Image (cartoon, grey):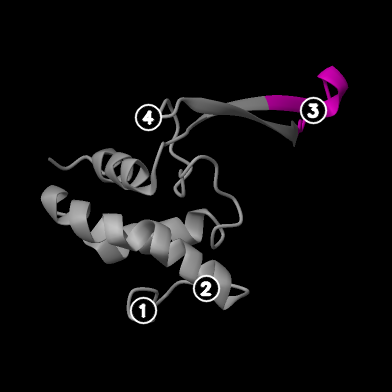
Amino acid sequence: MARILDGVLRPPSFAQEQELLDAVEEAAQALCPRYGLQPDDCVKEAARTSNWGRHVVGNNWWELQGTGSAGFITTLTLRKRKDGQHGGWDKLETQLAKFASPRDGVQAWCESQGRA
């Protein structure tokens, strides 16, 4: 397993690492080659983007935006304005896709890479 994760920060616990690998790796091995992608790249990006599974919404390990097979969730982030107007904060809404399964999430990630 460590081979797949070279170059990615290690997780805080083995349980989180194993959960990530179990959820994503099997689907990545099956789907990524169909798109000409390396399964390792899918798993590495999932680990990096989700902070080792700490920030995952609806099997979306990659923070893919839009609507997934299970709909979407809207997140709200506050960002301090440089000019100090409007109370000094901007609200940023992001629509993150939710997927019914890890396999659906991996397929969406593959499709987002722009290869057929």
Q: Nearer the viewer, mark 2 or mark 3?
A: 2
Residue 96 versus residue 7: which sits nearer the camera? 96
Q: Residues within 10 Å of mark 3 (few under 14, many from 20)?
A: some
- Local packing at callout 2 (Cα closer than 10 Å; few below 14, some 14-19, many 20+) is few
Q: CA distance from mark 3 to mark 4?
A: 33 Å
**Figure check: 36 above or below 105:** below
Toward which corner of the image does residue 91 lie, by quadrant? top right
Residue highlighted by disc 2: 9
Question: Taking 112 as reference, is 90 above or below it?
Answer: above
Three-letter residue code for mark 3: Trp
Cα distance in 3D space between marks 3 and 1: 43 Å
Q: Mark 4 falls on what kind of element?
A: loop
Q: Which residues are magenta?
A: 80-91
Residue under numbered circle 4: 69
Element marked by disc 1: loop
Marks 4 and 1 close (CB-CB < 8 Å): no
Left or right of residue 105, residue 116 in this image: left
Question: Mark number for residue 89?
Answer: 3
Q: In 3D space, how far apart are the residues under numbered discs 2 and 4 (Cα atoms)?
A: 30 Å
- What is the secondary structure assignment of the residue under circle 2? loop
Relative depth, front residue between 39 and 58: 58
